[in-house]
Amino acid sequence: MSTLAVNQITTQTGSTITVNSDINSSNITVPTTKKLIGTDSGSIVSPDMVIQCVTAYGSDTFNTSSSSWVQAPVSCNITTKEANSKLLVQATVAVWRSSSGNYFGVRSRNGPQGGSIASPATWGDGYMSSGNISWDTTYQHMYTAGAVGVYTNYYEVYANGASLWFPNNSGSYGSSPHRWHMTIWEIAQ
């Protein structure tokens, strides 16, 4: 085996250094107690790795009886670090539904800030048949962020003419700082 001793490696042309795939070993080994150190958060990226995670939460409440889609206060923005990343969005919301309605809907709204907003996921089968009910609901979906930039993520509800709290207004045991919580994972592709 040969040893190459250098203090710095730079490209001869362009901006990428490639390890040829036709060499005998397909691995680059970093010995024990040694580290490969990136100089910024985007230095080392491999497929399916988590690039970043952002979180938002709130204590605000929201009520509607609208028979059209209405934006709820559950929202979180992420500034992507890589183009074409997958964004995994997870939200937990305290929900309350009155006994006067049956079906209701929830949908996610996502897209680049200032650009086209899409609905990558819709849950149209929320149902309440009698009595008032309150519960925590978890919503999860994934979409692709096409370019590096700020992506807006929020939820809309369709109350279908009956009272729907999204998030709930319960204050029986004190004010809650977390009536809703949203986490967005940026995953490299």
Image: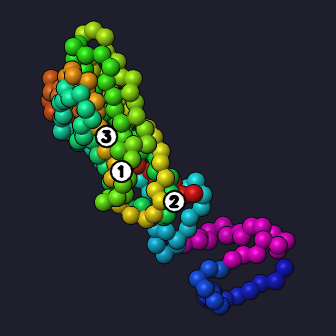
When asked about the image quadrant of residue 10, the answer is: bottom right
Of labels 3 and 1, the one closer to you: 1
Q: CA distance from mark 3 to mark 1?
A: 12 Å
Q: Quadrant of residue 2?
A: bottom right
Residue drawn at x 81%, y 69% is 25
Along the horizontal axis of the image, is 43 left or right of 107? right
Identified by mark 2, the residue type is Asn
Which of pointers 3 and 1 lies earlier in the amino acid sequence?
Answer: 1
Whether tag 1 and tag 2 are in contact, CB under 8 A, the answer is no
Query: Is 21 part of what is drawn in magenta?
Result: yes
Q: Position of residue 29 (x, y in %)?
A: 71, 69
Specify which label sits upstream in the sequence, 1 or 2: 2
Say left or right for 91 vs 68. Answer: right
Judged by depth in the image, the label closer to the viewer, 1 or 2, is 1
Q: Which residue is mark 3?
A: 155
108 versus 44 height, above or below: above
Q: Which residues are magenta?
A: 18-37
Q: Report the residue marked by disc 2.
A: 84
What is the three-letter code of the residue carrying label 1?
Ile
Asked whether the viewer can see residue 54, the reply is: no
Residue placed under numbered mark 1 in the picture: 117
Label 1 SS = loop
